[in-house]
Image (spheres, helix red, strand yellow):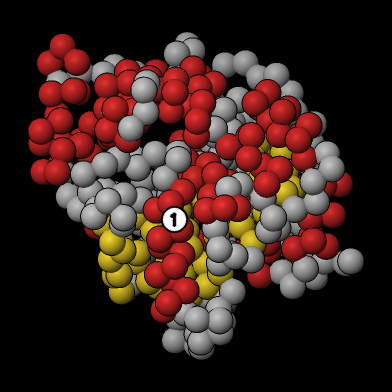
Amino acid sequence: MKSDFVFPPFVPHRLYRNRHLQTIVGQFHSRVKSPYQAEQHSCRLPDNDMLILHDDCPGSWQPGDRVVILLHGLSGCHRSSYMIRLAHKLNARGVRVFRMDLRGCGAGTGLAKSPYHAGSFLDLQIALERIEQMCPRSPIGIAGFSLGGTITLNYLGRPLETSGLVDRAVVLNPPMQLSESVRVFGKPLFGRYQRHFVTNLIKHVRKSYQYKNHTHKISGANYPKTLLEFDNQFTAPMAGFDSAEDYYTRCSPTEVLSHINVPTLIITSQDDPLVPAFTYQEVIDRLVHHDKVTLYLTEHGGHLGFIGGPSSDPDPRWSDWRIIDWLLTESPEGLANEVRNLSSDPVEQSA
């Protein structure tokens, strides 16, 4: 079946071939400066926590038209630049977008007693059920970024937990083996990434009065210097895991990929500094005979970077346009066939 879109390969901008530049500059380049106009909806969770959906609905949208939910990554929220950009671009094409603040994030700060994590797929289920109530008969797609992508794969890979609410999904740079991604932060030259995430996560915990009785876990002698220490001292015990390693093992999505039954595209790069390329070899092995999940592995792009050189795209944000291609194509199966022919082979990476 022929796709109605062409899926151009990623060619990095000549100034941003370095994976760290792609990753760092990618967080700020091509920001959309538009006023916040979303309508907020709260979702009550089974344990009485709450999360917030930010509803960006274009004036041209009609009941039955496409809807997309966006999930941010670690220490992100609805204000993350990639969330704003993609919502803006999808709105321009008549798509209604719900930017989901994961539990306790963004506008949901102070509304949750338990932290979000890679296994928070039941929270996504509740959000999707709420969206279906507001948009009956509308097809729903998911776009997940980094940790939000891991949550998406965990959700889709557990059919007993889903109810056919989604017709397609795309994820960008999702960690597949959480322990390996955390281990990366211990390498030389990666301290800045680790400090960034740990500092932001600690600020997030301290801003929420719901966590006031638990701040001792990340204060004084317990102050975490690494993401592993933060997850051991805070995330794992608060979320009901025995340890960080127990959390990483139970919430890494590689094992559930074969159970995904909706067209799903995974886009990641060989030079992602935060998600080692070798962790995708098992993914490739599992997807050999699986026609629903497609992996597109680029040579360059960093982590959530993908700043491209001159091309036919309207702007340099190559991944934005590939996500839109996937979400709007009439034939994701046809596009998947094209993507499989373009993907690179995985390589061992070094710092």
Rendered location of residue 125, percent (x, y): 46, 58
Label tally: 1
Rendered location of residue 8, percent (x, y): 77, 54
Inspect this view and state whether residue 168 appears: yes
Q: Residue at x 66, y 42 (%)?
A: 257
Query: Where is 16 relative to 48, above or below?
Result: above
Looking at the image, which residue sits at the far right? 1
Query: Where is 23 relative to 153, above or below?
Result: above
Q: Which residue is mark 1?
A: 124
Tell me where residue 12 sits by quadrant: top right
Q: Residue at x 27, y 51 (%)?
A: 47
Rendered location of residue 241, percent (x, y): 37, 28
Q: Residue at x 59, y 74 (%)?
A: 139
Query: Where is 302 relative to 30, above or below?
Result: above
Q: Position of 283 compared to 175: left or right?
A: right
Q: Residue at x 62, y 16 (%)?
A: 350
Q: Position of 175 compared to 254: left or right?
A: left
Inspect this view and state whether residue 195 appears: no
Q: Position of 256 compared to 35: left or right?
A: right
Name the quadrant of the N terminus: bottom right
Residue type at mark 1: give it: Leu
Name the quadrant of the C terminus: top right
Looking at the image, which residue sits at the far front? 160
